[in-house]
Image (cartoon, coloured by chain):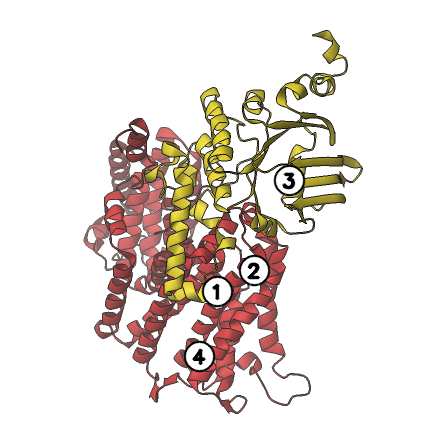
Chain colours: A yellow, B red
Amino acid sequence: MSTPILEIKDLSKSFGGLKVIQGLDLSVAPGEVLSVIGPNGAGKTTLFNIISGIYPPDSGEILLDGTSIVGSSPEQIAGLGIARTFQTLRVFLNMTVRENVMAATYGATKARMWQSALRTPKARREERETRELAEAKLSFFGERLVGYRWDQPAYSLSYANRRRLEIARAMATNPRLLMLDEPAAGMNPVETLEITALIGRLRDEAGFSILVIEHDMHVVEGVSDRVVALDHGVKIAEGTYEKVAEDRAVIEAYLGYGAAGRK
Amino acid sequence: MSNIGVDRWVAESSEHGPKGKGWTAPARSLLDRVPSGWKLLGFLVVAAVYPFLVPQAGVRIGITALLLAMLAIGLNTVVGWAGLLDLGYIAFYGFGAYFYGAVSSDQIGVQWPTWVAIPVIVLASAVLGALLSLPSRRLVGDYLAIMTLFFAQVFLEVIVNYERLPGVDTNLTGGPNGIIGVQPWQLFGFPFDTFNRNYFLLLVLLGLVIVLLRNIDQSRTGRAWRALREDTLAAAHMTTPVNRLKMLAFAVGAAVAGLTGTVLGPVQVGVFPNNFQLLFLITIYAALILGGLGSIPGAVLGAIAVAFTPEILRNPGIAGWLFYIGVVVLLVTVLRRWRMVAAVLAGVVVLGYLVRFLSLAIWDETILGAANDTFLSGILDGWLLILGPASDVVSNYAFVLALAGVLAVTVARGWRRGALLVPTIYLAILVWENKLSLQDSVTRQLLFGAVLVVMMAVRPEGILGTRRVEIT
């Protein structure tokens, strides 16, 4: 196996006396979709927050393409190639759809403020390229985020479209690893199917390695190359969807002790 | 376009559409189609013609408006775009004004040429702004506001009380007396030494600042500011260096304020601590919020409105117009039914005659005077109780009663509201004609406040602002 895009070694994090993540090892191979599942409070979102730089880990190592990113700020980590979406949507509501995506290119663009103020040729070219990039990313979502919506404020989008917009925005940072925090949360069955197909396309067509947290097992089944199950911050199972879904520890984590035996 | 169907229809026909709704929509969509460059040009042309049409006093008001517009635009960068509630803003204005005053008067015996002074002052203001941004790394919202307010107050204290630096014998700021004899700008041997010249200087500066800031707003920097206003954490995760951008926003705002300050000194031939009181900071905020937070044309319009409205209200005829139009508009918006409005107006007329008749019949001391000279005075003379000598006492009681009536109206519903409106409106007119319109300095402020309240109630997003959604 080639070097993993993301490799986490012996990661631990406590909030006071609460051990949220304990000795976690995890890796995402290039071009792989890895799902993280687990009951509420298992530490999934905390894991995302640690990887994306909101909290520093207490101990352990996080390697992006073999380079440690521990101690870097969120904007640095985003610049290095890890983009994420949020469980509770955090699009820039009062900016247009296009601006939302364009805003994610700040770290990759170079025009200084005085160059923008004077509209130097360089700044204008970069601005045009940014705009084209944003439109290309939005076009990935087909008619869902199509042309006429680009100039509308993000708050006018439906819930599902805001989720799509958040993914488009994350794509615009040009990441190597895309982290999706419950992309199907709050979606109806049709939209859930679309999201499942979308994650597949993100891997196959756009070529991202993807780390996804998801509660909807249909989505997990549909998208995952591998699944990691967490409970109380500890990895309790890892492998293909079929293997994890039938794992005794996983079923007990969700349904309680002894549930696995009953059938 | 062909296969969108329902989605597109929804987008174009509901409020999700770009045009919006309401009776101003056609005008607004027409205005939207004019490129912003042409709008700016149109504004500059009108503003350039203005001083030739008005007396000297009008030019002075114009200068006030332009100063306010510059300040509002600079403040917009910090508050409207980056979303940082900066109450220390006034200090940068003061810093620019005092700096220019110190190096362009006899205060410390230094006379810098303008082309040296201005860049240095603008740069120094920006650095000061960047320094003040340091607390914003950790503090946002109310806490940042308190912190920066403290800075504004410290600035005032320092210029008033620490006019001498320790160990230096020069009086730097003139203490409570300020700096007098500030020299005008002088570029290429041309002195900006009259009101008209300063007016045009400000107009050029304003145009320049508008163009530069608009370009920044539409660049990656402007987008990043708005992104961190919307959601700082998400912005950081989208590769935005949050702290650097906050610093940049503070620095740009401070630079504009500092630049504006350098023109204040020459205009009033001095700079005084009084120019930088918190009341004026609130005036800048009023202009910006009235015009629409986040919009440059809005900030300019807001500044013009805030600068001119109190001056226009000096004219009792116009103030009278405004009062009666305000009464009718409020009546319509409160009642919303034409039949009810007509009934209330009829009630007011009947009540007026009744009170007049009863007063003349019962109260011996009733001596009728004449209504103030407004467009309605002919009608009012024969209807309203315009009291002569006893007017003060009666109208004071009426004032209190009218206020109580207004409060009661806000609580009442249905026909009770209409019934309460009749005496309330009558009392309001009585108070207006007998008392308020005679004391224009107080009334001006009251009316101005009322205008602001009504404006903000009608359009909370400001004249040219766009509606902002917090959580949906």
Q: Do dots 2 and 3 share one subunit? A: no
Q: Is residue B67 above or below residue A127?
A: below
Residue B409 in the image, given as x and y percentages of width and height: 40, 38
The answer to which of marks 1 and 2 sits earlier in the sequence is: 2
Residue linked to disc 2: B244
Q: Nearer the viewer, mark 4 or mark 3?
A: 3
Q: Is residue A230 left or right of residue B146?
A: right
- Label located before the other in sequence (1 or 4): 1
Left or right: where B77 falls relative to B23: right
Chain designation of label 2: B
Callout 2 environment at 10 Å: few (<14), some (14 to 19), or many (20+)?
A: few
Disc 3 marks which residue?
A4
Amino acid type assigned to the residue bearing label 3 in the image? Pro
Find residue A154 and report its horizontal and vertical position in percent: 42, 40
Q: Which amino acid is tagged 4? A: Gly
Q: Nearer the viewer, residue A50 or B273?
A: A50
Gap in Å between the C-alphas at discs 1 and 3? 46 Å
Which residue is located at x 52 percent, y 26 percent? A186
Label 4 element class: helix
Closer to viewer: mark 2 or mark 3: 3
